[in-house]
Amino acid sequence: MTGRLDAPLKVAGRAKYAVDHNFPGMVYGYVVTSTIARGEVEAMEVTAAKSAPGVLAVYTPFDPLELHQPPPLMIPGEAWIPLRNRDVAWYGQPIGFVVAETFEQARDAAMLIEVSYRSLPASTSLEDGLDTAEEAPELLGGAPASISVLADGVESIEDALADSTVVVSETYRTATQNHAAMEPHSAVAVWEAGELTLYSGNQGSNLVAVELSGALGLDSSQVHVVNPFVGGAFGGKGRTSVPAFLAAAAARALGRPVKAALAREQVFTATATRPATVQKISLGADRDGTLRAVSHDSWCTIPRGGSFVEETSHSSSLRSYATPNLSISQRVVPLDIPQTTFMRAPGEAPGSFALESAMDELAVALGMDPIELRLRNNSIAPPGQDLQWSSKHLDECFSIGARRFGWSERTPRGHMDGDWQVGLGVATAMFPALRFPSSVEVRLNADETAVISTSGADPGTGLLTVVSTVGAESLGIAPDRITPRLGDSKYPPGGMSGGSTATASTGTAIMVAAAEVIDALVALASAPGAPFEGQEVTYADGEVHADGRTMPYGELLRAVGRESISAVGSSAPGEEMTKHSFSSFGAQFCEVRVHRLTREVRVSRLLGVFDAGRIINEQLARSQMIGGMIWGVSAALHEGLELEPNGRFANADFAGYLVPVNADIPKVDIEFVEYPDTFHNSVGARGLGEIGVVGVAAAIANAVHNATGIRVRHIPITIEDLL
Ligand code: MOS
């Protein structure tokens, strides 16, 4: 098994991230943010800032940069363009940009700006807005906000619930989260002859190039986005960041390269967050646990005028369990809050907290084992839909996990170990298997090497290594002969590292491109004047063959005087979408220990067993799952942005916004059941980025209930909840 190809560079500090790029004459930009949540900037006193040492320019809504709203991308939501008007729509909104010879000078000058506001009362409470919530704007795939599926003769979901022997009906809440990637959003912008090169961590450099060119009024061919390494993204770098827009426009205005990075505190307000949610779930079941009705109504926060929706009902309840009666709805509560966007397992992560907690509550109400309840309602197709899952081995995930975790030792009330109350919990994990359009170039070189290039990103997922592995397989040569290249908008458009799609999308495109370059090579070999002129030529293992004679492709290229031969292959979701439903599945197991006196919760064991099709590289796949599951612990016990009534986040820094440290995380155990899913794509991998986080928070809350008898219906769970 190949290790992570970029690991040596990263651990040795030799990987150059965006802000590690320096250019002669480069200057530094510092973002200024608002200190009210709603209203208007009346005036900005910038005289002192402008005359401070080293300052080149102070851009504000009164003296803005030239930036336009770019056209929408294929991903949900929209770009937010800074400094276009004097409106303040949230606390911490970018309202200015100071450029100076050094970073310190820019920052110091920014502190000298005096802003006066006309302030309006801000709405920041999801709870207060529930009664006046609005129907969600357009959802993924154009789905309606409300969906109802009722069995013949059933009039309403209320009737179906009333006819159920056992009903659980509860409301669950999840917190606003920030992606908090290690690398703050940043950019270095360099113009030359009217063309821009921008270095900035992102999840798809061609998408950023499209967005930036729209904002700058250029053709996308005039914008070159380079994304060498990414220090974490998780959805938070899916679109162009504020520093990228500002650095690009300021560098054009000043004729100097500009570097800009958000300070850590600014990452919490000048980027987008995961919305907070409130979810009301009702489950009705027969005495044997068979579900009769599932009702899931969701509300999420949204900035006024925004369009991104945290689709908790549509993701969890519309996919998980077989039920003859289903009703889901999605509403939004417009507030004066920062932009919102997708974050690892959008919809599924908070949605699964609610649904998988409710399933546990139903198991308790029925006096039934929670795994048995889940398997009793195992679906062969998404509820209310016709297309069956292409491949589903959730039952095996649970049976393997139960054995490995010692599930049979669990008692309905946990057990004591010294001063610790110990409990076990489980949850189902699901994440849809998707693909995006992707193009890849495969080039065979006369020196027997190959280069595989696509604009997509490796934000730490391991895609670079996957490109090498799938390329090697497709060409029948050793991986060390292949140079994989990602993160440059000049390469063929490789889609986006998001939605757990990159391996399936890029991998399939590599197979197509490899087949095409092999066709071209074979044609070259048998062309007039070539070594195999007129012969029936085949290709295998890096060599062309005909009539018992073989020749390595490099030798053939040299014989015909070529340095290389290349082909671009593309793939996109297609006919398979009309034949099956596609999802990855998993079973999350958790053991918690709650201290009898202090009420602190420690997660003491975690196991995830996943069914995600073919696993291309087990080491990388395990890392993805471990990271996701740790984030689940974080969501359950640590993370949450707290809004003050004035709209300011009370904990917008790493002192107050808690994420787990090593001492919070036990050994994380991972297993895969491996059933390659070639219904989904020819590589057979269904994608693994996001499913790791799904269900973990519920498994923890369920384990806390098992340990203490206390049901906490919100995350993060704190000590106060268990007093
Ligand atoms: Mo991620 S939420 O797949 O960009």
Image: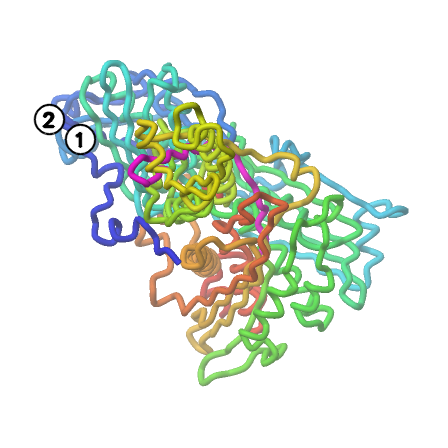
Residue 307 picture quarter: top right
Where does label 2 land, which residue?
A: 54
Callout 2 amino acid: Gly
Amino acid carrying mark 1 in the image: Ala
Residue for point 63% across, 60% down: 394
Give the residue at mark 1.
106
Query: In this picture, is 51 found above or below 717?
Result: above
> In the picture provided, is 377 more to the left or to the right than 519?
right
Percent of width and height locating residue 649: 38, 44
Counting residues from the start of the chain, the first of labels 1 and 2 encountered is: 2
- SS for callout 1: helix
Rendered residue at 32%/31% (across/down): 559
Q: Would you say 441 lies left or right of 608 here?
A: left
Is 472 placed above or below 397 here? above
x then y, percent, for residue 160: 82, 52
Above or below, comparing residue 665 to residue 420 in the picture: above
Q: Report the magenta residues as a range.
A: 429-451
Q: Is residue 157 visible?
A: yes
**Colour logic:** rainbow
For the view shown, which residue lies furthest in the right direction?
Answer: 153
Frontmost residue, 63 versus 39: 63
Determine whether the residue tagged by mark 2 lies in a helix, strand or loop: loop
